[in-house]
Image (cartoon, helix red, strand yellow):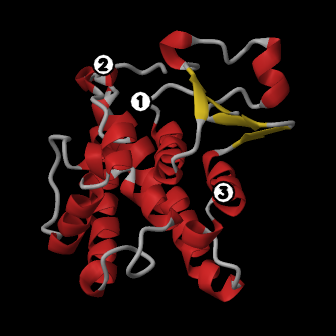
Amino acid sequence: MLKVWGRRNSYNVQKVMWLIGELDLPHEHIDAGGDFGGLDSPEFLAMNPYGRVPVIRDGALALWESQAILRYLAASYGRERFWPDDPRRGAPTDAWMDWSQTALQEDFLEGVFWGFYRTPPHRRDQAAVTGSIERCAGHMRLLDRLLADRDFIGGRDLGLADLCAGVALYRYFHLEIERPDVPHVTAWYDRLQARPAYRAHVMIPFDDLKGRLRN
């Protein structure tokens, strides 16, 4: 059976769990990281020498890095829905997946969620936080233009790019920050919230992380 290590309120773990939910894959979840610890054990480091979650084990394969895990699960178990045989069809999804990690995730997760929400007020670098919020607004406007004529990032159907970018929305729309008017992103978020796997694996309260600088 597929095994997944990670804490459920981890941003990157949520991407993986969301796809597992969409594919309805039998799995075992093992709490790890944060208050659960276990990332420095010899057994865990043998699976991921980097010592971070998520990690999956599927038979003899141990795999880490959330984007790599998504691609592996999609190619192994979701070819009809998430992994087209034609590389020309899959290439745009790959591009948006990488954009989500190198642009949106960096500015939102590191700059806003960590810099603002998880940092106590007296320790915040407000100028850096303001810059990250502004860059996130730009990312949301970009997505808003893209989503003006489609339901999901890749078109009509949910794809891996939606998982990589959409995982941010639950936190983004619940933080007390200034946000732009992005009606198409809001409609996309509504469509994601209608999905049972999104509600189960992404819409997880994160109040316990407020002001906590450690995992």
Q: Residue at x 57, y 20 (%)?
A: 33
**How would you rate the neighbour count of disc 3 (Cα within 10 Å): few for under 14, some for 14-19, many for 20 or more?**
some
Which part of the image, by quadrant, shows the N terminus?
A: top right
Q: Tell whether label 3 touches label 2 (CB within 8 Å).
A: no
Residue type at mark 1?
Answer: Asn
Element on which disc 2 rests: helix
Task: Looking at the picture, tell me which residue is in the foreground, 97 or 79.
Answer: 79
52 left or right, relative to 16: right
Residue 128 visible at all: no
Q: Tell whether label 2 touches label 1 (CB within 8 Å).
A: yes
x then y, percent, for residue 146: 34, 81
Q: Residue at x 76, y 12 (%)?
A: 41
Q: Residue under label 1, please give it.
A: 9
Above or below for 63 versus 34:
below
Q: Nearer the viewer, mark 1 or mark 2?
A: 1
Q: Residue at x 12, y 68 (%)?
A: 181
**Which of the two labelled residues, at mark 3 and mark 1, occupies the earlier sequence position?**
1
Q: Tell whether label 1 touches label 3 (CB within 8 Å).
A: no
Q: CA distance from mark 3 to mark 1?
A: 24 Å
Residue type at mark 2?
Answer: Asp
159 left or right, relative to 94: left
Task: Looking at the picture, tell me which residue is in the foreground, 193 or 102.
Answer: 193
* Residue 208 in which image quadrant: top left
Element on which disc 1 rests: loop
Above or below for 158 versus 195:
below
x then y, percent, for residue 101: 53, 57
Element on which disc 3 rests: helix
Q: Residue at x 81, y 16 (%)?
A: 43
Q: Residue under label 3, please give it.
A: 77
Residue type at mark 3?
Answer: Tyr
Q: Residue 208: give its label.
A: 2
